[in-house]
Image (spheres, helix red, strand yellow):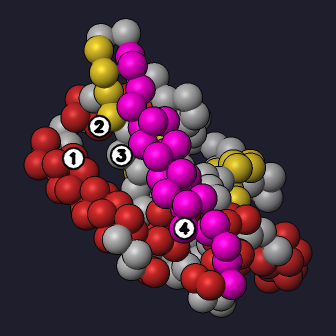
Amino acid sequence: MLLHGLGVPEHVFLCRQSQFFTQWECAANGDPDAMVDMLMVCRQTDLLREMIGNDADSCPGASARFKAALGRELQKMRVLGSDGPKLRIPVLASRLLFGVADTAGTLKYGECFIQLEGIDTPARVLVTRSPCYHPGDIRVLHPMLLSAVTSRVTPSRSEDVARRFAVLRDVIVFPTDGKRQI
């Protein structure tokens, strides 16, 4: 409802829902790539580690545990809200990140810095607060690359800023200035 209230068309939600359940069906039918995606969505990293690199015979009970994990995730997705049933639709390319402030003051309003393990930096990111109650809790930001961040500071500070930002992985850095907090 929040994204719909911000003008995102209904067909976008229906398309996401269709993609998710197609992926779900493929995983339930044993497609290895779809199974990996679903285990990531279900946050079943222990089972994922066990299944990767092994065949079905060397993981006794893995298939049953996988199907049980899918069942638990389906139950969690059926959320009863104050205005009736709701369905949570996980986005497979999403990440849950901790946010930190840019104490160096290099990021501008509407920007962020992220370095995701194993993923190229996207052109835009959709960021939500958790919990998300109001349309203002959803923002679209432009992630900055390390080279762009360091080019904004004086050469004397460039090395220090590069060192601080380069070690950050799987977190999101928000600017400390601007007309509205993120």
Q: Amino acid at mark 1?
A: Phe
Residue closer to the observer: 11 or 123: 11
Q: Is residue 162 magenta?
A: no
User: Crowding at label 3, few (<14), some or many (≥20) Cα neighbours within 10 Å?
Assistant: some
First in sequence: mark 2 vs mark 1: 2
Q: Amino acid at mark 2?
A: Leu
What residue span does the magenta drawing correspond to? 58-81
Left or right placement of residue 171 versus residue 9 in this view: right
First in sequence: mark 1 vs mark 4: 1
Q: Label 1: state its secondary structure.
A: helix
User: Crowding at label 4, few (<14), some or many (≥20) Cα neighbours within 10 Å?
Assistant: some
Left or right placement of residue 19 versus residue 46 in this view: left
Left or right placement of residue 112 versus residue 106 in this view: left
Which residue appears at 32% of the width and 27% of the height?
A: 86
Q: Look at the numbered discs 3 and 1 and tell me whether their residues touch, using CB distance below 8 Å.
A: yes
Q: Is residue 112 visible?
A: no
For the residues marked 3 and 2, what is the alpha-carbon distance in whole angstroms? Answer: 13 Å
Residue under label 1: 13
First in sequence: mark 4 vs mark 3: 4
For the residues marked 2 and 1, what is the alpha-carbon distance in whole angstroms? Answer: 9 Å
Main SS, magenta region, reads helix
Q: Nearer the viewer, mark 3 or mark 1?
A: 3
Q: Look at the numbered discs 2 and 1 and tell me whether their residues touch, using CB distance below 8 Å.
A: yes
Which label belongs to residue 63?
Answer: 4
Q: Label 2: state its secondary structure.
A: helix
Residue under label 3: 89
For the residues marked 3 and 1, what is the alpha-carbon distance in whole angstroms? Answer: 9 Å
Q: Is residue 175 positioned above or below 123 on the image?
A: above
First in sequence: mark 2 vs mark 4: 2
